[in-house]
Image: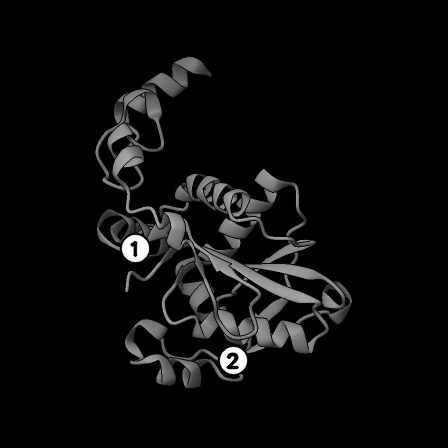
Amino acid sequence: MKVLDGILDLLFPRRCAFCHRITQEGAKICPRCVAELPYTRESAKQSFPHLKSCCSPLYYVDDVRRSLLRYKFQGLRIYAELYGEFLAKCIDENPISCDSITWVPLSRKRLRKRGYDQARLLAEELSRQTGLPCVPMLRKIHNNPAQSGTGDAKKRRENVKGVYEALSEEEIAGRRILLVDDIVTTGATLSECASVLKKAGAKEVSAVTLARRKD
């Protein structure tokens, strides 16, 4: 197995998930990025309607933005493992009380086109690293336009209104839920999902994303 891994490393050398440079010994991230990524630090937490809190370890700029675009649109789901480490560290440094993890789901149309749900992969990886159960709780029932091209915060809120529904109230009622997504900008999508979960009986909803907009 080690021989095969060595051959694969020669043919397909591992690249840093952020700057995309070749790394030594198959590392997922290079030392430069470990030191210089745009960490949110004391600005990790944000407040949005219906959410107890929302934390993000990184700002959505430069190499972080390019990395997430590769993850979402170029099939590099291998990044989920490293991203999960960042999410786990973020909620460890910004304690969030929760009973279970869920995610902001893609529509069936976009899921068929992309082949995977990037937020679900993050939620499952975070579950693996924290030991918290990962449970599907939401379904996207309308294939609305992408939030990135919608406009200001008001238009984004309108764009996601009524787009999600709760799956099983038995899995939601009385639970403290951690909602996972890849990026947060205005918080409209997370707020809408949290509202649906709370109407279904969730005790409280918090959120974690890999990156947030830098104001």
Image location of residue 30, percent across then percent down: 28, 30
Tag 2, which secondary structure?
A: loop
Q: Earlier in the sequence, mark 1 or mark 2?
A: 1
Q: Residue at x 51, y 73 (%)?
A: 191
> Can residue 116 be seen here?
no
Q: Residues within 10 Å of mark 1 (few under 14, many from 20)?
A: few
Q: Quadrant of the C terminus?
A: bottom left
Q: Residue at x 70, y 69 (%)?
A: 202
Q: Is residue 100 left or right of residue 148?
A: right
Q: Disc number at residue 163?
A: 2
- Vertical arrangement, residue 150 with respect to residue 41, above or below: below
- Vertical arrangement, residue 180 with respect to residue 159, above or below: above
Q: Residue at x 36, y 46 (%)?
A: 76
> Can residue 42 be seen here?
yes
Tag 1, which secondary structure?
A: helix
Q: Is residue 88 left or right of residue 25?
A: right
Q: Residue at label 1?
A: 69
- Residue 166 occupies which quadrant of the picture? bottom right
